[in-house]
Image: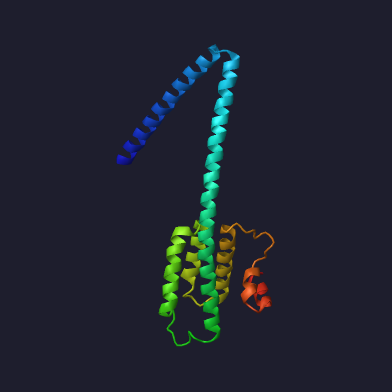
Amino acid sequence: MKKALGTTISLLFSFILLYGFYLILSKIFLSINELNPNVVASIIAALTAVFGFLYNQHQTKIREIKETHRAKKVELYNEFMEMMFEFLDQEKQGKFKNIPDGKLPRDVEIKFMKFHRGLITWGSSVVIQKYIAFRNFTTKPNSSHLLRLVNDLLLAIRKDLGNSNLMLKKGDLLKIFINDSNEIDKLFK
């Protein structure tokens, strides 16, 4: 009942607002028809210049914000890559053999918490979704699916940083740090 009333009021308000715009625009166009064509051309040129300037300023501001965010993202994603490579190195050395499943050493947990804070602030929505899928799956034993999720996450990170993934085949990023490239090829066929 309240939803229907709220919807009705918002539709009524929208209609009144649109009708008001219609009245204002019709008055303006009627006034313009009565003006000298040279004056109308000058007004149109001035409005075009003002809107062009405003658009340019808006685009410049967006570009500056993206560049600032990009620097933060590069730092954040480098931190993640360092954690991943450090984790893989420690895994090769057998440092996680005596640790119960699903439990990470405290120093690794602290690094991940720091990464999570940065991801919330600077990560794109696609990277966040890929990371959540990766994180939710890390406690499950199917390593082939986990590798697919890591690959998807790495591709999303590259895309978020503005890099092209066009020439990369599925699994190419994993081949950088996993020696058995034939196994990776089988995984993605």
| Up/down of 38 relative to 151, above or below | above
Q: Residue at x 58, y 21 (%)?
A: 42
Where 4 falls versus 19 (above or below)?
Answer: below
Figure disc tally: 0
- Classify 185 as above or below 168: below
Residue at the extreme left: 2
Q: Residue at 57% of width from left, 65% of height from top? A: 152
Residue 38 versus residue 133 in the image, above or below: above
Q: Residue at x 57, y 12 (%)?
A: 36
Task: Decide which of 66, 173 is in the foreground and name it.
Answer: 66
Q: Looking at this view, is 37 or 10 the one in front? A: 37
Q: Is residue 171 visible?
A: no
Q: Which corner quadrant holds the C terminus?
A: bottom right
Q: Position of residue 70 (x, y in %)?
A: 54, 57
- Is residue 142 found left or right of 3 in the rendered image? right
Residue at horizontal 52 percent and vertical 64 percent from the top: 75
The image's colouring method is rainbow
- Report whether residue 129 is seen: yes
Left or right of 68? Residue 174 is right
Query: Where is residue 92 drawn, in percent x and y?
Result: 56, 84
Viewer-closest of 34 and 100: 34
> As drawn, is 89 to the left or to the right of 103?
right
Q: Position of residue 119 (x, y in %)?
A: 46, 62
Q: Quadrant of the N terminus?
A: top left
Q: Where's residue 84, x and y in %?
A: 53, 74
- Quadrant for residue 180, please give it: bottom right
